[in-house]
Image: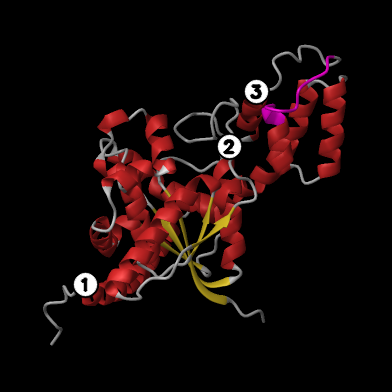
Amino acid sequence: MKKLKEDVVLTGDRPTGKLHLGHFVGSMQNRVKLQNEYAHCFYMVADIQALTDNAENPSKVRENAFEVVLDNLAVGLSPKKTTFFIQSQIPEIAELTVLFLNLVTLARLRRNPTVKDEMKQKGFGENVPAGFLIYPVSQAADILFCDSNIVPVGEDQLPVIEQANEIVTKFNSIYGETFRKIQPILSRAPRLIGIDGNNKAGKSLGNAIYLSDSLKEIKKKVMMMYTDPNHIRANNPGKVEGNVVFTYLDIFDLNKIEVEKLKAQYRLGGLGDVEVKKLLIDILENIIAPIRGRREELAKNPKFIENLLQEGTEKARAIAKTTMKKVREKIKIDYFKPI
């Protein structure tokens, strides 16, 4: 029997909507792989983080908490290998966040490229909620409360991991060796663009194909995909660069030789957009159909989801208490010893 590595893996999602193909290639495939390699894996429903830009719509966050768990279970995360928990039910994470905030400057938070990009995308300007601005600090606490040192992420989240490691370095230098450096595990696709070709696929942008989409929805979205606007007739030479259909084929079609042949034919002329889109529809349906089927079965038993979250949260809370006992001792705020 293969011996599992003793490092600790942590991953999670903001419960602001169902998950899509961007999440699938961005981190979910890695999550499934890592749970078969590591002895300690945690999955977090990041509801507190979701409230940083949804504070006025808590129902949206609450309603999607189970949805993101369903998506992850349907993709292949196993409660036997991965501990599922809810962020808001671990108050020690909030306490750790407050302590970490003392180690980070406002200027450094504003320089974080991931935060800057998301602030621009959401149109916050100077009216950014403080909770949103500091979420990289909160993420550091999310990761470190359970001594995690392995985190599967997309390339766009690397600045957040970099900032978390800065916190680790500063904490350890002031208070003594406490936390381990975090190692990001990158996805095979750096960033999945949306079907519109203008942005990364996103829940809030309405440009994503979801893991729960029906075949009808997949067909509709693929047929809407941005291609080469000058490729009006099939016989015309077409551009592959910037063509969303070919971008998706590069990622999801495992027959790379065939994809290169299609690209060559498209560039020369003689291959229509509809023909290529039909191929992509078949490929995506083959990926999504089994996930969708498992998801529909799991959704019939909400009590199962509730129980695994409660059990996982209790386990995570026990670990969090141990971590905070150690942290309080390091910072010398352990005033009253248990009798």
Viewer-proximal residue among 35 and 331: 331
Range of magenta residues:
236-245
- Classified by dominant secondary structure, the portion drawn in magenta counts as loop
| Among numbered discs 1 and 2, the one appearing first in the sequence | 2
| Among numbered discs 3 and 2, the one appearing first in the sequence | 2
Q: Residue at x 86, y 19 (%)?
A: 269
Kindly indicate the quadrant of the structure image that contains residue 55.
Answer: top left
Kindly indicate the quadrant of the structure image that contains residue 141.
Answer: bottom left
In space, the residues marked 3 and 1 are separated at their CA atoms by 54 Å
Viewer-proximal residue among 168 and 138: 168
Does the magenta portion include 238? Answer: yes
The image position of residue 166, as x and y in percent, is 38, 59
Tag 1–tag 2 contact (CB < 8 Å):
no
Helix, strand or loop at mark 1 = helix
Viewer-proximal residue among 200 and 88: 200
The mark lying in front, picked from 1 and 2, is 1
Q: Which residue is mark 3?
A: 226
Q: Which residue is mark 1?
A: 331
Q: Quadrant location of the C terminus?
A: bottom left
In space, the residues marked 1 and 2 are separated at their CA atoms by 49 Å
The mark lying in front, picked from 3 and 2, is 3
Q: Which residue is mark 2?
A: 213
Of the residues shown, which amino acid type is indicated by label 1? Ile
Of the residues shown, which amino acid type is indicated by label 2? Asp
